[in-house]
Amino acid sequence: MSKSSTLLLSIALCLALTACGKKAETPPASAPGAAAVEVVKIGSVAPLTGPQSHLGMDNSNGARMAIDELNAGGVTIGGKKIKFELLSEDDQADPKTATIVAQKLVDEGVKGVIGHLNSGTTIPASKIYADAGIAQISPSATAVAYTAQGFKTAFRVMTNDNQQGTVLADYVVNTLKSKRLAIIDDRTAYGQGLADQVEKTVKAKGVAIVAREFTTDHSTDFMAILTAIKAKNPDVLFYGGMDAQAGPMVKQMRDLGLKAVFLGGDGVQMAEFLKLAGSDGEGVYASSPGNPLDRMPGGKAFSEKFTAKYGKIQLYAPYAYDAAMALAEAMKRADSTDPAKYLPALAALNYTGVTGTIAFDEKGDIKGGAVTMYRVHNGEWVVAQ
Amino acid sequence: MDILLQQIINGLVLGSVYALVALGYTMVYGIMELINFAHGEITMMGAMICLAVMGALLAAGVPLPGLMIVLIGLLAAIVICALLGFVIERIAYRPLRHAPRLAPLITAIGMSIVLQNTAMLIWGKQYITFPPLLEITRYDLGGATITNLQIVILLMSFLLMLGLMLLINKTRLGRAMRATAQAPAIAGLMGVDVNSIISITFVLGSMLAAVAGVMVSAYYGLAHYYMGFLLGLKAFTAAVLGGIGNIPGAMLGGLLLGVIESLGAGYIGDLTGGVLGSHYQDVFAFFVLILVLTLRPSGLLGERVADRP
């Protein structure tokens, strides 16, 4: 009872402070009476240039929206009014750049990082954040290795590849009833990790892997590997990689007369894929970790807010938003912006975000991460089954 | 057998595009000994301009058949890229004609960054899709499939290459170009307007690049501000493979590179029993390049030329 009344009181106090703060902002920060505003820097890293920049901007905007809302609502931590500042950096989806950017953020004194987007960049950067003791929450990295390194600072709000790969493999065997599976991956930590997990699980269920081919995350021509695959006559083709490759890949599959069902992971389950694949995308299956927007508890409201501000959601924006909110929530609960103090609170967090309940297991993976299967129907992604 | 045929078809289509772009590199190198790194970006511009014009026409609801819209887009791309090639030579290379060789090379790289970022600012970072204006028909060819689009790409590339060969070997302009390539100063003394020949070379190369860009975007169904980089790199490799500065060499190099890549990716896994997979596709192509350059440093058809004074 007394606790809740204290909470109410502090909320009232916060509101009052915010009101004061707004008035006090008009003259330059000279009023000594008002509590000093402490600027807390939060990093956001994603590829903002290059082939994946549409996804990178989406992540960055998701985090920015959370930060803007937090600032608008007013946050007081440790008795000080807090103003969050988002430092949005570009890692170009390149592991080397990712470490440079991570070091830059550490040097600039960020208190937490939302990112990176790709597994391939998240993993090398995580060592730098771990050494600096700064919390890192990736909204979209799904490679198992990220949280398997034993860092106390590494978290993710996204279902990992093992969870997703297992669901995909079940789908291949039980729903698509595949007997001959072909696998392509793009040799990134994400694509390869997912493809390996699918291969391992499917093999264990006794389905033949007839071909395993590779490409890169810059390629647009897949005729050669698809021709090689066609010779092996598969009934399902699984691609571990991103939409930018999957779109032209499906087109070229159909050009070659390869009739296998195309199946992808969350990198394929994107609005962009539909544009790129055009009519050839019809009937393609893809999984997505987490729930679709309309199944997220706060999905509809988020979608409306985000679309009004930044345009169409690509995919990960709600997760980036939740990651930023979870970080702020842990700071509030620990009543400190010092990573050493709020990290335990983040590890023990149980917070209801837009995408669902944000709670981490002992590795830093999201607990009970959902996976949803989608299928392209009339040029739209619809939930399959 | 049908798989081998299919791989060769794949390789030839890819290679003919490489060859068209490689021609631009090799023509400029032949005349100015300059590697025009902005050339890949011109290809990208060609694709983007074509898509933008087609998009505008479609949005305006112009009642034309799909093929006409594509042709108008292609024409616009060729004209604007020709202009772009002319302007780039004028502002970025001509003032440096007598500067040390490194200087124009650096402006070339700078130009490519400028073009790439201009395209990013105009058309954004997302992939732009080629509207479904072309009816794709598939033909069966001894077990392999070939689409009408692939046939058009092959035919158009070969016709353009043939046209260029005729232009260079049979016309007055071609003779002037060859003379400028051999010795610009002497050609000037003989009454050749070296400046306009160099301009024409850039314009021709850019027009070919525009066609290649449109073909690539139609073939893969997309264009992107970043697409010129890798395409330019591959085409440059093709030009070097064939012997840079040599026009038939660029064509041979392009086709060869396409086929090598295709066969490499298709067979490397089976041949090595899965030890090396198709991710060694590019390694394979560049290995062939290294091999050729070790045995024939001036490329397959390149001649050993004396240093120009």
Image (tube, coloured by chain):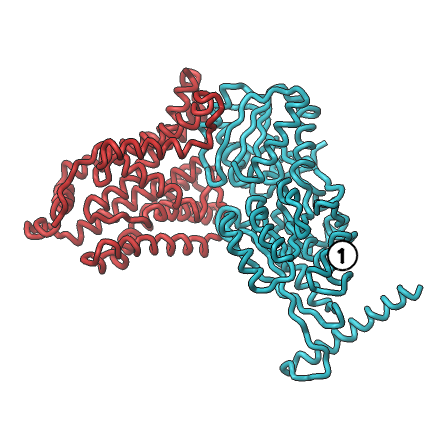
Q: Is residue B127 left or right of residue A76?
A: left
Tell me the cyan chain: A
Q: Residues within 10 Å of mark 1 (few under 14, many from 20)?
A: some
Point 27% across, 47% down: residue: B35
- Say above or below: A161 vs B105: above
Amino acid carrying mark 1 in the image: Ala
The C terminus of chain A: image quadrant? top right
Point 25% across, 45% down: residue: B204
Closest to the observer, B59 or A161: A161
Residue indicated by mark 1? A345
Work out whether residue B152 can be spotted.
no
> Which tint was used for chain B?
red
Looking at the picture, how far across and down is residue A295, in whole percent?
75, 44
Looking at the picture, how far across and down is residue B101, in whole percent?
22, 53
Mark 1: secondary structure: helix
Determine the image quadrant of residue B259: top left
Judged from this view, the residue extending furthest toward the left is B190
Looking at the picture, how far across and down is residue B119, in whole percent?
42, 53
Point 77% across, 49% down: residue: A357
- Say above or below: A169 vs A364: above
Query: Chain under label 1?
Result: A
